[in-house]
Amino acid sequence: MTALPPLRRFALGPLPLAAGGIVTDARLCYRTYGRLNETADNCILLPTYYTGTDRSYLPLIGPGRALDPAHYFIVIPNMFGNGVSTSPSHWPAGAERAAFPAVGVIDNVRAQYRLLTEELGVRQIALASGWSMGAIQAWHWAALFPSMVRALLPVCGTARCWPLNRVFLEGVKAALEADGGFAGGAYLTPPEAGLRAFGRAYCGWAYSAQFFREARYRLLGAETLEDFLRAWEEEHLAIDAGDLLAMLRTWITAEIGDMAAGDWVQALGRVTARTIVMPCDRDAYFTLEEARLEVAAVPGAELRPLASPYGHCAGAPGRFPDETVAIEAAMRELLSPG
């Protein structure tokens, strides 16, 4: 693991949104590792994921790793709503925070494009990758700016929010909103009961049946299943409820077909990057079946599933050794001369 560089802020000014509305005084916060080369084409882009920040990818970055700052200029932009870039938690509690506008995936990607081209001088992206919502953004990058993205590695994340994925998200959202203290998002104090319910409801989707059957939560420090559920509650208590729902809105509205008049197959056909897609074979909501449908629409793309009992969390950066080895091997392959 390498040292943490300073957090930087890119001022976007008023940010018009694809779905309407505007984020006033939008700021995109990011960290970079390494240096941009003279041809400005050694950039690796890692968009953040749900409840993650730029710090979350640190376990994958360092000397001798696939993401080595000695060779690459690694850029990690924080998604809007994650509490680092402009988010509801930055706005006053109450009605103003509840009115935070709906920011889409494409809004994040367009803001990141401005960061890379206007602020950082990047001309080409050697690899766009990410886990979960980071993968969704990487997919959109490769379809929206195909001439700029040379290689693509989405890990445990599809290009659109498929129906089952939406059902899962609607369930955890309902658990949070059922807390009367949430007050339609205009809460003045954190809705603790709703946050606990959100975390407990989410937990079962994140891992596989095998994970729970074999009590693999003990490998993560939880003695009992109840301990594990409570840990998920506590983790979500530390996150602003408005931020959780802002990111969830971004996720639930993810549709790569929006850039092709609703035709997701046509949108994916725009991807020209060398592409390896790595779903987990036991992911409960970014499913292998739907990853296979998307791969079929991308010329030359390879489907390379992670066989793992850890379900969606198999792709979490650096969390599980065997899965991390497989992910880094794919990165090295995509970054090697084609």
Image: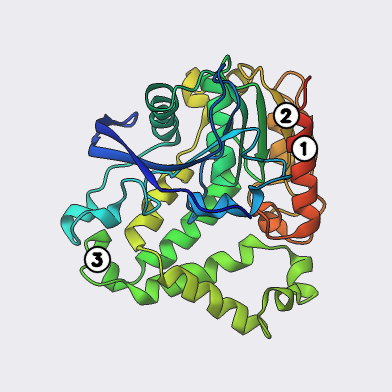
Which quarter of the picture shows residue 313?
bottom right
Work out whether mark 3 precedes mark 1 in sequence or the reverse, and give the earlier one: 3
10 Å crowding of disc 1: few (<14), some (14-19), many (20+): many
Which residue is painted at 39% across and 32% down in the image? 107
Q: Does 197 sit above or below residue 275?
A: below
Q: Work out whether residue 38 or residue 227 is closer to the camera in this orientation and state it.
A: 38
Which residue is painted at 66% across and 41% down in the image? 67
Left or right, residue 122 beside residue 104: right
Residue pointed to by mark 1: 330
Work out whether mark 2 precedes mark 3 in sequence or the reverse, and give the earlier one: 3
Q: Does 260 sit above or below residue 190?
A: above
Task: Give the mark toward the camera: 3 or 1.
Answer: 1
Question: Hey, what amino acid is under mark 2?
Answer: Leu
Q: CA distance from mark 2 to mark 1?
A: 9 Å
Which residue is painted at 57% across and 23% down in the image? 37
Query: Residue 229 location, x and y as percent?
Result: 58, 77
Secondary-structure class at tag 1? helix
Mark number, residue 183: 3
Secondary-structure class at tag 2? helix
Q: Work out whether residue 137 or residue 206 is closer to the camera in this orientation and state it.
A: 137
10 Å crowding of disc 3: few (<14), some (14-19), many (20+): some
